[in-house]
Amino acid sequence: MRSVHVLGLGMLAGAIALGAMISVVTYRWQVEAFPESQPTAASAHVSPGTPATAMPAGDVSQGQTLFNARCSACHTIGGGKKAGPDLHGVASRRSRDWLIAFITAPDQVIASGDPTASQLVKEYGMPMPNVGVTRSDAEAILAYIASR
């Protein structure tokens, strides 16, 4: 009977070790496979500050495709509020760095206590989800928004 308990504990310890190993491998794979989608600590604490006077370089047609796929369910560009704010003229209200940080990692910007992000959550009753937008995708989305 005693050997059954020892065997059970050994299997449990092995399962825990295997789970930990899988978690580490998965995390490392994500970091290495998707380096752009990993926001930097500094990007989560960017001030909304000075409006972006020069629009980011980005592919407008790619931005349109990305906007339609990832943003249009909650946002419009000149069509009024939906689940999220209307984005027409957003570059005149927020800095480019803040916009990129918020588009790529809204969860981190909100968690940082950013007052603008907190106000948006309060106003719309929910946080913007992190939909896995990379920095280059965010630049393309901003270029599309500016073209409208």
Image (cartoon, grey):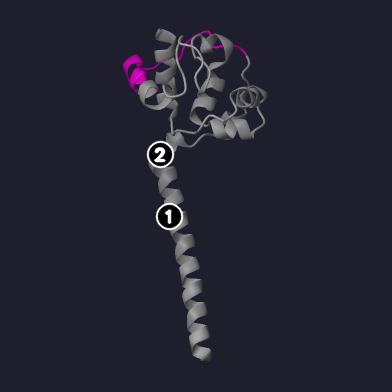
Picture quadrant of residue 18 = bottom left
Disc 1, SS:
helix
Q: In screen coordinates, is 112 left or right of 148?
A: right
Q: Nearer the viewer, residue 124 or 68?
A: 124
The x and y percentages for residue 142 are 44, 17
- The quarter of the image holding the C terminus is top left
Residue under label 1, please give it.
Answer: 25
Q: Amino acid at mark 1?
A: Val
Residue in view at x 62 percent, y 29 percent: 45
**Residue highlighted by disc 2:** 34
Q: Kindly report the distance in space between the C-alpha atoms of the residues bearing marks 1 and 2.
A: 14 Å
- The residue at 35%/14% (across/down) is 60
Count residues near mark 2 (Cα–Cα under 10 Å), then give few for <14, some for 14-19, many for 20+.
few
Q: Which segment did they paint magenta?
A: 50-65
Give the main secondary structure, helix, strand or loop, of the magenta stretch: loop
Tell me: residue 77, above or below residue 74.
Answer: above
